[in-house]
Image (tube, helix red, strand yellow):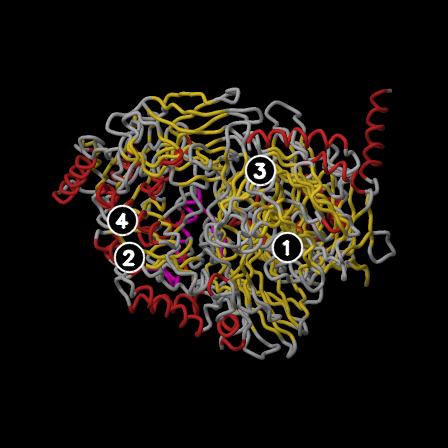
Amino acid sequence: MELKMKRFMIAAALILTQMAMAEVMVDYDFSGEVPAARGKLPMARFNDHITISGEPGQRSIVFDGKKSSGIIPSSKNVNMMKGGTVVMTLKCEDKEDGKNYHLFMMKKDEWLIGYSGSEFYFNFFTERRWNQGLKCRLDLSRTRTVGFSVTDEGKYLLFVDGKKVREGVFGISTPPLFNDSPVQIGAGWGGWSFKGEIGGMIIHNEALTDKQLMEATERK
Amino acid sequence: MMKYILPAVLLITGVLYAGRAPVIDYDFSKKTDIRLYEGAVQKDGALHFNGKKSYAIILGSGKLNAGPNGLSIVCTVKFNDREGKGQDVVGKKSAVIFSRNDAGQLFCGFNDSKKWHIGRAGELVPFGKWVQYAMVIERIPQTSWGQVPGYRVNMYLNGEMIGHLFSKDITPVVNANDFILGCGEGNDAWAMQGEIADVRIYDYILDEDKVADLAYSNKRLKLKKSDQYEISTGLAALFAGLRKQSISKEGKWVLEALERAALNGADQNQLAALVKCLNNCGKVRTIEKFAESWNKSQKLTKIIVKPGIAALFSYGLDGNHFPLLGLSDLKTEREILAGNGLFWKMELLKGKEFSQLDSSDEDWRRTSEVDSGKIRAFWRNDTAEVRVDLQLTDSRLETAISAKSLRDDTLVFSVTYPCWTVALLDKNSGRMMNTHGEIISNPAVNTFPRYNGAILYPTTGAPMQFITYYDDKGGIYLGVEDPHGGIKQFQIVSRQQSRIEFSSKSPVSYEIGQTGRNQYTQRGVGALELHRGNWYDAAQIYRRFVTAKADWWIQEIPRKDTPQWFHECTLWIRSHLWHTPEKANRQKDWMIYLRNYFELPFGAHLYYWDDQKKGAEFTHFMPLEFFPSFAQELKEVGIYAKPYLNSHLWAVLDGPDCKSDWMFSSHGKNFAVKNPNGSMNYEYYMGPGKTSGPRFQYAVMCPSSKERLDYYLGICDRVISYGVDMLYHDECAGGNKPFTCFEPAHGHLMNDSDNWVRTGYVPALTKLHEKYPEIAHDGESFAEPYLKVMDGFLTWSNPGLPPVARAVYGGRVVFTGNLFSYAWKFDEEADRRFFQIITDQFVKGEQMGWFEPTEIIDFPEKMHYTKQLMHLRLGLLDYFTGGELKVPLKFKGTPKTATYTMDHRGKPKITNTIPMTSVNSIKNDWTLLIMANPTFEKVDFSPIINYPGNILLEFDNNSGESRDIRYSGNYTPDISLNPKGLKLMLIGMEDNTEFRKEAERISELLSRVSGFQPPELEYQAKSNALTAFTGNWIGIKDAKETKWCKRSVKNDFVSWTAQNAEVNYGVVDFGDKPPSRIEIEVLVAPGQKGGKIELRTGEALMDTAVIEISDTNGEYKKFSAPLLRKITGKRQALVRFKESNSCTFKSWRVY
């Protein structure tokens, strides 16, 4: 897992140089002794229930599935449905409650990325309700680098470890809603708290191409 | 040639410069290009701001800064009531602030990038009335040795300089931000609600005359200069001619008085005739003969002479002047008055409109009468009638005023009288003491550190009703001797740096529904009296008044109305229970430990004991479940419980946790003080112990609302039933701002100066005293009208002031605590501060303390010294509670001083004379001299002892033995006092058995106290302790708590440290033998900064070791450092990281 984290960061750095056009809003690297925030937004504020795992130089942050959470400061403009990409290297622990709900990221009443049972989710909010944008079976019991991209027209891509897993177009009957809430990491709804580890995460304010997303999630 | 050219160039430059137009010049009665935002509008000749988010920007003004050439801002503003909130008028973000503060005063200054330099001054800026606001920022260069360079801010209200601020060795921020109107640093919180009619900004320094010209030419203000009448050429020539002649000093005195009368509007033809009379009798010597000659030679004025003082009154002289023309101190041969000398002002209310009248207005019909020592003067027009009585007695002028409205639709709303304008005394030796007891030199230029401008009585700023101004030749007492202690507003203002004005403004009451024809009769008198000393002598004049007339004077001391336990209480501990039984129990453990060591009872001032889940803070005071038994347990071990109450406020959201309106709308709102327009007054506080977050709103209650008092007395009954010994009434007794109330439903008079004390708090607290004679009471700060109903006063915020209250009231006034620090930091400065404050309290006869247990519990020396002083106070109690304070000791030569600071930024600085001394006498004519050295150095001094007596005993500090000194009323020994040393001397009139018995008693006391030993260092914590004394490594898994850092999943390290991150280990046992070093195991990887890591120990978490760590190339390494202090036994311990991202920390050990 630790080596994978390191690779993820190297790959991410390479890709960043190639993607001059896409603004990197968030680029968190938790593998070092000091968490690094290289994107436009500063380091997330994590509460005291976050712990650290791994050996020096190969760290990751650990969510306890109960109270651990973080908030990305100044992230009110991270509007995935206006076009955006999230790349995360993570591993889920089974909560052993029969449901295994996890929230990786959530912008309240706007969008969320999570996990249910053994399925990866992306949902977005419209006038009346949460819409299930994407639901895809995925094994996250081992460390994976997951990249999800969506355009403002609803065209989406899902890559895992450099391989395309799913693509398509969301059926959007009413326009998605946007608000000023910040992006939360690891929590958002009771019972959906994330249990597992995150090695790093990147958020762009636009969708990436197939090639870009493949490279961003490729683990060398 | 050059000698002509240079001055000419300078003159032309000066003229051009002085007359230069402002860079910004907006008159909002004309069309302007000002940019308006968020609801700001330009209409009806002014910019209007809504008190929410509105503001205006002066585009292009960013280039103007408070630079070396200066910056001046002048504007005409009108404020509307924002219910106790400040309002920003003009601002330049992060650079300049110009506002009206929460207290209603002008408030302005600049930023130097590290901090704001802000001053406040002047009287309350009224609502609904146009005023001119001006501030001038001026660079003061270092022009000579000794001149301190810096920046000065002059503050002006309506053209008068009302204060200034000087900041040395700083440079104001220069930035490109444009000036903003109606908004500033306070943002929405201080948004302006009112109007700005014009604003001018100059890139140079406007002088006082120019600012005054702008004010007097401003048609909105309608100002007039009452002491600036133009003197005709003929009369000026007569004055000048006589000045050149050789006339007596008495003649000169009258001449100057006549010149002032001319400036104040006296008839100049009649003055010319008087000057001619003066010509005839100007050479007569002695004041009595001169007066006789003068009084015979004309029938317009009269000189009255009394011992030490002479006055020139006018009774036939026409004009707008006040009839007191001159007042001479015959001993110093100085005129006391300046400018317009004495005058009055009156505020009228017609419907909702306020207007002003004063004694110099032109439309009065004036008459006056003089007889032997008295003058009566009358002013009458169609609206009002005023009478002033003046009486000259030995070295004293007394005066009183009455005023009456003559119209059905007009009320007299306030009367300001007396308004004394006195001449400056010697610039070098002159000192002025304000009503708070602050003393400054040269008041023409300097301002008081805390209380400038308008000060309300009775409050901390004005606990008594007098000021004094003196120099090495003599002094003036200016008192307002109101025996009933009604609300009034005092004001000291330096006028044009050439004279000092002191005034007293009183509200005038009227019946509910009354619209006119009310009247005011001053209670007591305003007095000017001459003295030959300093603040103490002025205090003795005031004492004469309170002894004879004041409602609150207590005849017999020691007070019989105070519980004996309170008399004997020597110390107060401040104890925060923080709403939890765990924290409360910890406080209890500490206090019991202190109680055992001190071997004397003391008091515990308890905070945060109430359950805010049952009702909001400051309002309902429902107890936490554990509190009654907690108070009882304290009582059982001899600790007096004094819980916090607040008599002044009611939370607007008074339900659980300040989240709902429980009883405010149904009760609190009805009990609140109402302003004339029906609005309420508020204070704003964060939750308990919070320094950030939302502020909650609390309305000010009217103490003359019977229902309010019944509710509050019900709370007192309930709290007393828990078994407490005393109640602390916060914001009562001087700690609050008193209001007059206009709520008809309360049933009291409108705008009544007695609303607050006489018909409010005094009868309420009297009821409590009568019902519970063994329960004591104290309130915040000191104010004299509460003397009879309070057993003590918590004067927490004013260290370093002279003991003026004790000089007036002696043992009748007891102070119950002082704040020991604004900073939670333990270093040499904290030590200096502690020993000076507690010694000052002891010497001045106060009950000591009001510090938290953790401020002394780790410091054996402080505990030892405190114990000694506690026992000494109890042993010498008669001199404190049964004694009077005598004139302070003087010294041969200049005594040493010692300084400490109240906070870690070095402010405020308090300087004390060393040794600290007091002289206390008791009924049988014994006088006790106390001299104490609170410093860490030996001090040598020679006191000049000249108190009445025939026998003097000097006590040895250590053995307690006394030594007879040959004494005949004069003794100047050379004394050397060791650090923390004490010297007592006892003077008696007669060397008899009783005196010797007292000497023996004091000897025994000193001997016993000198035998006290410091406590064992160890505080026996009851918790299970980690073991450190075996050299064990203590890891993260042992930690009780981590703060601002992250633990590892395996609990074997912490990382991601923020600045000042902490790992708290709880109680650690360091063993019997103090370890000498600490070793830690850390990893410092790329991106981590290393830096300082501290071990902090003890209940106060003192710094015990500092370990400097550097890069370890990503591997765990060990670092060690010596321990800075000896530490043994069970102590609290934590590790603190000074830097953010300091390191990955694993474990520590001591060895």
Residue B77's x, y, as percent?
72, 56
Cα–Cα gap, marks 3 and 2: 58 Å
The answer to whether residue B14 of the structure is visible from this angle is yes
Chain letter of the residue beneath label 2 in the structure image: B
The quadrant in which the C terminus of chain B is found is top left
| Residue drawn 82% across the image and 31% down it | B11
**Segment colored magenta:** B527-555
Give the residue furthest to the left: B993
Which callout, 2 or 4, points at the residue further toward the start of the chain?
4
> Which residue does the numbered mark 1 point to in the structure image?
A108
Chain letter of the residue beneath label 3 in the structure image: A
- Badge 1 amino acid: Lys
Cα–Cα gap, marks 2 and 4: 13 Å
Chain letter of the residue beneath label 4 in the structure image: B
Cα–Cα gap, marks 4 and 3: 64 Å
Cα–Cα gap, marks 1 and 2: 48 Å
> Which residue does the numbered mark 2 point to in the structure image?
B631
Please identify, in this view, whether the residue under mark 4 or under mark 1 is nearer the observer: 1
**Disc 1, SS:** loop
Residue A143 image label: 3
Q: Are callouts 3 and 2 both on one chain?
A: no
**Disc 4, SS:** strand
> Which residue does the numbered mark 4 point to in the structure image?
B602
The quadrant in which the N terminus of chain B is found is top right
Q: Which one is in front, B703 or A30?
A: A30
